[in-house]
Image: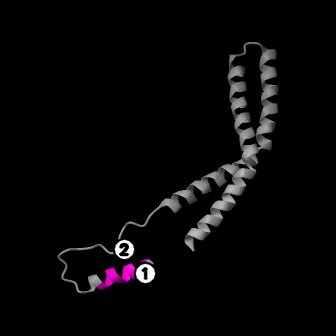
Amino acid sequence: MKKFMLFIGGLIALMILVANIGPMIILGVSVWLLYVIFKQFIKSDSTAGKIGWVVLGLVVLSVTFSNVFAVIGLAAAYVLYVIYRSWKKEKDEPVVDVMDDDDDPFTNFERQWAEINQY
């Protein structure tokens, strides 16, 4: 049942990620453009050049804010990663530690009970 729920959660996260892939690309490009515009603003010496870079920066900033819901796609990608990681996790660790020279008569019973409950 746990694997089925992980599959359904992964399927939903994948659909959300695919639906938001376009806005995620536009968000990444606009953040990169803001970085480039900021660097050019710092390099500019003239007042008219600085005003031009600020105006262009405000236009790109509005594009960035209009695609801020692409963060939902990033969250879906993270959820998909967590589901994939928990899907690959294997249960190799024993439930009861095996002790070789143990005089407790209930250790064998606890080990067998853990093996029965494992399936």
Left or right: residue 111 compared with residue 67: left
Image: 93 above or below 70:
below
Residue at the disc numbered 1: 117
Name which of mark 2 and mark 1 comes first in the sequence: 2
Q: Residues within 10 Å of mark 2 (few under 14, many from 20)?
A: few
At 56% from the left and 68% from the top, the residue drawn is 3
Left or right: residue 99 compared with residue 114: left
Left or right: residue 8 compared with residue 59: left
Q: Amino acid at mark 1?
A: Asn
Position of the N terminus by quadrant: bottom right
Magenta stretch, main secondary structure, is helix
User: Which image quarter: residue 118?
Assistant: bottom left
Is the image coloured rainbow, by chain, by secondary structure, or in one colour? Answer: one colour
Q: Residues within 10 Å of mark 1 (few under 14, many from 20)?
A: few
Residue at the disc numbered 2: 95
Residue situated furthest front in the rendering: 119
Q: Is residue 115 magenta?
A: yes
The nearer-to-camera label among 2 and 1 is: 1
Q: Is residue 87 magenta?
A: no
Left or right: residue 90 compared with residue 105: right
At 36% from the left and 74% from the top, the residue drawn is 95
Judged from the image, the secondary structure of the residue bearing numbered disc 1 is helix
Report x, y in % for residue 28: 70, 38
Judged from the image, the secondary structure of the residue bearing numbered disc 2 is loop
At 72% from the left and 43% from the top, the residue drawn is 24
Q: Is residue 72 visible?
A: no
User: Which image quarter: residue 51?
Assistant: top right
The part of the chain drawn in magenta is: 109-118
